[in-house]
Every structure is written in C-alpha cells, then in structure tokens.
Image (cartoon, rainbow, N blue to C red):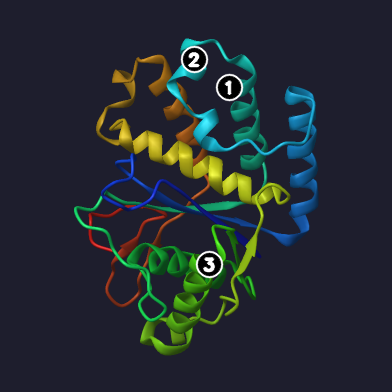
Amino acid sequence: MLVFIDESGKPHPKDSTENPVLCAVCIKERDIKQLSQKIFNLKMKIFGKDTEVKSTSLIRRRILSKNMTNNKQYVDEFVKIACSFDIRVFAIIMEKPDTPFTLTKTLIPRHYKMIISRVEYFCEKHNHEKAILVFDVINPGEDFVVAKCITNFLFMSKLGKGFNHILEMPFFVNSEVTPAIQIADIYAGIIRHYYENGLDLIPQDKITEPFELWVNNLFLQIKNKTENYKQDTSGFIDYGLYKIGKKF
C-alpha cells in the first residue's frame, strides 16, 4: 500500500489560508500504473502535454468567473478518475494558529500523528501488510526533520511502537514526475476550500453560489472515499476527515 501525503496551506499565522489541510491518499500498488496512465491521458487530452498542475491554480473562483473551462474540466475528470479506484482518503483540517509551531525531530506534530494513525487503522482493518508513506518534496532540511520525527514517533512513542503496518522509512518524491502525489495535492485543496467557505456548516440545499456548489460536489466525491474508526477500548471515533483547532 502506498500512501501519498500532501498539504494545502501551512499552519502558520502569516499563511494566507485559514484552514490548512494535511491529506493522505492510500492507493494499492497494483493500481498505481493504471491510475497514473489515466492521469497522463487526461493531461494530454485537455492540456496537450504532461505537465504538473497544482491545486492552487486549479481550484479558484476565477476558474468559473473567467470561464476557464479546461481547468474545471480537468479537475472534474481528475477527481472522478481517482475516485473510481479503490482508494481511501484521510485528512486533518486545521485552523490558522495564533503563533507558529516549530517542527522538530523529537516531537511529531499532532496532524502528522493523526494522519499516520488513520493509515495504521486502515491497514489493520483491511489486512494490508505495510504502508509506505510518500511525501511531496519540500526542501532537504524540512524533509529530513519530517522523516526523523516520524521514525522517532514509530520507534520511541508508546502509540507509535504499537503500530505494525507503517514502514519506518518515509519516501520523498517530486510531484512533477509522480502523478499519484498530485491526487493528494488536489484533494487537499478541495477539502481546504470546502472548510474555508464554511460549507460544513451550511445545509446542502442552501448552497447556491456556483463556486461553492462546485467545491461541494467535488468534496462529496472525496468524502465517499474515507472511513471512520471506533476505538475498542475507549469508544472514541477517529473520523477520516477530522477538523482540529489551533494546537499542533
């Protein structure tokens, strides 16, 4: 099982996003080639070339207001293609913090721990032997710290040491040449816009603005690919899409 992880926005007081998102997309290894081929074919059909298109340029209000039909068509078909496979999606939705948090080798951030926990529970429930965590490359320094805090969590914490399905060595790939990581990027962007527009607080029949209707439709497709886990001892439910506060 390959687990592609990417974020939309940064949990930092100076970041422009109000609800940064960390998203994980679990894909069976046997599906990677076919899924990547379909994404490649889609890019060639719509853009005429195999190019990386980030969610920040695809999921914007001006896509509809300026009638940028290629971009909208790409997102619509991209989400439909990815959701046609037996994937699982997990996301942690945060609030912009008042103060920046420091990523260290010794203390895993709360949103990373929550994502990894959901991947572990998914693998245990569905009898997947190992999950390989695959992150989009940021920069060597930050990637190194992320890798160390994850391995330290798995080797040193009481919770992490009980996990048997997470490969202890996360991988870092370039999203320009790894189509599957682009799924996590686009899904994270959709989820972020859903929560930043407050659509989780609005009844479905009250969503009428065109951009919000579009985002809501995309989000509902993604929501159908997640699942929740009830802890046997405490009865606590770990929701597949989970909104947390400002503490990391």
Residue type highlighted by circle 3? Asp
The residue at which mark 2 appears reads as 64
Question: Residue 50: which quarter of the image?
Answer: top right
Q: Secondary structure at mark 1?
A: helix
Residue type highlighted by circle 1? Lys
The residue at which mark 3 appears reads as 143
Residue type highlighted by circle 2? Leu
Which residue: 51% across, 41% down? Answer: 222
Q: Is residue 203 visible?
A: yes
Earlier sequence position, callout 3 versus callout 2: 2
Asked if disc 2 and disc 1 are in contact, CB closer than 8 Å, the reply is: yes
Percent of width and height locating residue 76: 60, 27
Mark 1 surroundings within 10 Å by alpha-carbon count, few (fewer than 14), some (14 through 19), many (20 or more): some
| Quadrant including the N terminus | bottom right
Q: Is residue 86 visible?
A: no
Q: Secondary structure at mark 3?
A: helix
